Image (cartoon, rainbow, N blue to C red):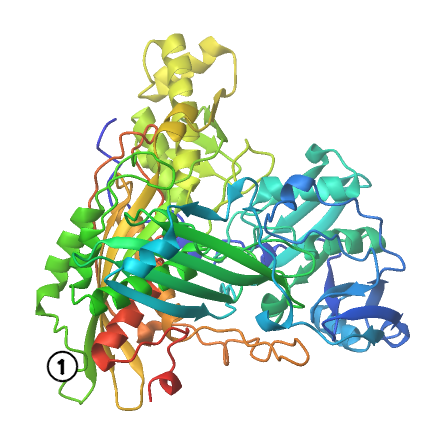
Amino acid sequence: MSPTLIGQPITRLDGGLKVTGTATYAAEFQRPKLAYGALIQSEIANGRIVKIDVSAAKSASGVVGILTRENAPRFKPYPDNLTKNGAPGESRVPLQDDDVYWVGQHLGVVIAETFEQATHAASLVRVQYDAKPPLVSLADVSPVQPEKFIGRERLQAKRGDVNSALVTAAHKIEAVYSTPIENHNPIETTSTTAEWEMSDRLLIHESTRGIKQLQKIVANAFGLPPENVRIVCKFIGGAFGSKGFQWSHTLLAAAAARLVQRPVKITFTRPQMFDSAGQRAHTEQRFSLGADEAGKLVALRHATTTHCSPVSEYTEPCGNMSRMLYSCPNVEVSHQLVRLNLTTPCPMRAPGEAPGVFALECALDELAHKADVDPVDFRLRNYAESNEYENKPWSNKKLRECYQRGAEKFGWSKRNKKTGSIRAPDGSQIGFGMATAIYPAGQQKAGATAILNTDGTVTVRSATHEIGTGTYTAMSQFAADTLGIPIEKVRFELGDSQFPEAPNNGGSWLISSVAPAVMGACRELKKKVVDLAGNWPNDSTQLANLFSRSGQEQIQAEFNSEPNKEEREKFSFFSYGALFVEVHVDLLGQVRVKRVVGVYDTGRMINPRLARSQIVGGVLFGISTALMEGTIPDEKTGRIVNPNLADYHVAVHADTPEFDIDFINEPDPHMPDLGARGIGEIGIVGAPAAVANAVFNATGRRVRDLPITPDRLI
């Protein structure tokens, strides 16, 4: 492949549209006769609806219709493959019964001429309940052990004899770590605009990172052929794990539009992002670790307790990386699940890895300290040369190089292992901490179409997404590089369910899934053109002759790609990183992250500018997780008490440290076409642990419960 574009730090092609406000997001589409919907939401967390009184709302100014269970369509159930075995999202379609499972559950929609009128009228709806005490805490109910999540992967794993190994271990720890409920808070809240173009044809503008999945969900619910439902989403204003599953608002918007025979828009308020769009579940993680005199792990037990909602079985898979990140002969990983009257949990950036590796890397740091071994050296002593859980070799692994380069760039040798021994001129205590990052390198089926136009430009299409990661830019690089043409001549189009199939934007698999399809379509197009003309046309005359000879107004080629099953069965695919941080802790217990060095092995670099941006964003997310974020439910009512960005704190510009991000940049020989692995989610992994470990080095205090707020240190 020509090196002219792949690996170059090309500026984002959609950047101008975004900074000038001309990129159109889901809530910004205006339709003729557009009406606005406001959700009617439950005020209790557990019980049944006795009566919904909409009389006052009906007579309110501007109201054109009210949708409740009384006049809702009979939605067909969600497909089993989207709800069974712990798949994320809700398993219950809306408005089909009177049961209430959490505060904020959708009970209906008020439709009015304006957003303000709809919101006011919804406040006039009165609901009578038969309420029961809610279950809100992990201690409220006995847990069960889920066998699977998202299809077929086991959540329980065991090898060797952990109990016997712990008895004879020279160094061991027992510790419990916890992470709170956390909520996705993208700048763009969820929004749906639904319009019935005919009685059986539905157009939806939706903020979703799963347009093809949503198309299937909506078509199934209304009993329509999938091609009769079109989902459009050209830009997504962030998601971080939200906007990808079967929440009820989309069906309600479509049902409301059918009821009033007008387009209807439902846009979430910020508080609704806390009760209607998923969340990362609270976790409690119990660790037992043991090492021999040489600092080699002999035993590892990781037991997670977490929760789901009454209409979901999704399990935060905290222990998955503990099965194989380090070499250890005796390992036991388990998960317990509790059903609580809280909104349905779902994946949030690096689901399982973010909270699970936090606990694992803190536990490892504790054991290294107890064994009096440097934390980096301790990890190198326990370096896994193969995946001991799957009994497979790694596809490619340069984690050792990440440790070594990161430690050198950071100045790790200057770390004082005596806690609380270094102070800044202002009296703050300085600490150094580090952690490992790891994330699966997945790949999915995808398709693309490449079209040569009469003006010499090439349009490439795939039903993928621009979630803020740079898809427009990266895919244009692949197309232009494959065709050997300037990137200015490529127009990459996405975000339309009419385009060829692409997977949900999640799991950090977009590049490795969609890029092979884009490259394949471009290769097929180039072959067609060369077969017709003998070469790719370089001027208007050659173009005119080509299209005259073809007898077509466009020349088009398609390609579908899928993972190489043989390679996937033979090797274990992951990306890796080593993260080093410096924190300052002042006399009031306020923690500031001053400096971050991260070195990552994610295969081949496609666009270093985009890659660095993703890691910086992910690490900052991890700092926010470590120090600030936590959703707080009222234990008596189940109501979220901080559903806003004033009380739910997230990192901002003032919290941003100095970043030094580097990449090994070695292609993975077993990844197709590119040798590239995903980058989107690995940035957050390890960051909370690195901060917590640095806080210990600074203060001598082990904080095992996130977030690390000043009250935990004073």
**Residue 33, position in %: x, y?**
76, 56
Q: Residue at x 26, y 38 (%)?
A: 604
Residue 223 visible somewhere in the drawing: yes
Callout 1 environment at 10 Å: few (<14), some (14 to 19), or many (20+)? some
In this view, the residue in front, 156 or 472, is 156
Dividing the picture into quarters, in which one does residue 429 lie? bottom left
Under circle 1, the secondary element is loop
Quadrant in which the C terminus is drawn: bottom left
457 w.r.t. 466: above or below = above
Q: Amino acid at mark 1?
A: Ile
Q: Residue at x 38, y 50 (%)?
A: 161
Q: Residue at x 74, y 74 (%)?
A: 44
**Residue 572, position in %: x, y?**
35, 36
Q: Is residue 494 left or right of residue 704?
A: right
570 w.r.t. 206: above or below = above
Q: Is residue 119 left or right of residue 465?
A: right
In this view, the residue in front, 518 or 604, is 604
Dividing the picture into quarters, in which one does residue 302 lie? bottom left
In this view, the residue in front, 2 or 34, is 2
Q: Is residue 184 left or right of residue 405?
A: right
The residue identified by callout 1 is 422
478 w.r.t. 28: above or below = above
Quadrant in which the N terminus is drawn: top left
Residue 277 visible somewhere in the drawing: no
Q: Residue at x 21, y 42 (%)?
A: 665
